[in-house]
Structure formats: C-alpha cells, structure tokens
Image: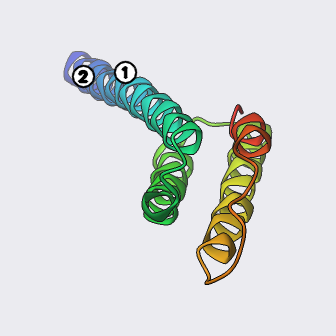
C-alpha cells in the first residue's frame, strides 16, 4: 500500500512538472509573438500607416493581458510590469485614435516608437 501511494505521489508530481514546463514553453512562444508584434507596430509607425494601428494595439493589449493571467508563475512585480506595458499601449492607441480624427496632425512617430520600446 505504501509503495502504491508513493508511486501515485511521484506520478502526480511528474504530471505537475510537465504542466509547468508546458506553461513555460507556451509563455516563451507568446513572448516571442508579442515581440514580433511590437516590432511590426514600430514599422507601421515609421511608415505612417496610422489607420491600422488602433486595432493592432488593441490586439496586443489583449495578448498581454492573456499572458499575465495565463502564467501563474509570474511574480507580482512581473504582473505589475505587464500591466504597466498594457497601460502604455492603451495611451499610445488613444493618441493614434485621436490623430485619425479629421483635421488632426499625425502623431510624432519617433516619440511613439520610443514608448513602444518596452
């Protein structure tokens, strides 16, 4: 009976370890995708393709929020940092949205690109 209990505990730990490793691998994939998306946003800024940016920022913010919630091993500090990044992207999105209104000058792309370099 003791052996079967010990074997069950080992199996349970092995499953937990596999789940943790898979979550970490998924987080790495998600972070790589997010970095690629940020680089694409910067290129769109440089090309002054303003009309595409609000949707892209919204998608990026949702991806970051999903990452923050979906990674249970993140520290409070890491979650706070991600929330700060989400807020920065929201502010940039609002600036871009406002510039799309009639008779508004386009935002300064170099300033927005520096903020997006998180």
Q: Nearer the viewer, residue 22 or 2?
A: 22
Give the image quarter of residue 5.
Answer: top left
Mark 1 to mark 2: distance in Å?
A: 15 Å
Number of callouts in the render?
2
Vertical arrangement, residue 14 with respect to residue 81, above or below: above
- Residue on which disc 1 sits: 21
Report x, y in % for residue 56: 45, 56
Vertical arrangement, residue 86 with respect to residue 118, above or below: below
Q: Nearer the viewer, residue 51 or 102?
A: 102
* Residue positioned 47% across, 30% down in the render: 31
Vertical arrangement, residue 59 with respect to residue 79, above or below: below
Q: Residue furthest bottom?
A: 102
Callouts 1 and 2 close, C-beta under 8 Å: no
Report x, y in % for residue 75: 71, 37
Classify mark 2: helix, strand or loop: helix
Report x, y in % for residue 100: 59, 74
Q: Nearer the viewer, residue 27 or 34?
A: 34
Which label was assigned to residue 11?
2
């Amino acid at each position: 009976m003791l052996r079967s209990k010990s074997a069950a505990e080992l199996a349970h730990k092995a499953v937990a370890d596999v789940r943790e490793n898979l979550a970490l691998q998924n987080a790495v994939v998600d972070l790589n995708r997010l970095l690629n998306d940020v680089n694409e946003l910067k290129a769109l800024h440089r090309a002054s393709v303003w009309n595409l940016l609000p949707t892209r920022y919204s998608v990026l913010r949702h991806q970051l929020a999903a990452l923050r919630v979906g990674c249970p091993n993140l520290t409070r500090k890491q979650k706070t940092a991600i929330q700060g990044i989400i807020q920065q992207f929201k502010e940039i999105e609002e600036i871009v949205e406002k510039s799309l209104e009639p008779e508004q000058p386009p935002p300064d792309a170099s300033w927005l690109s520096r903020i997006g370099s998180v």
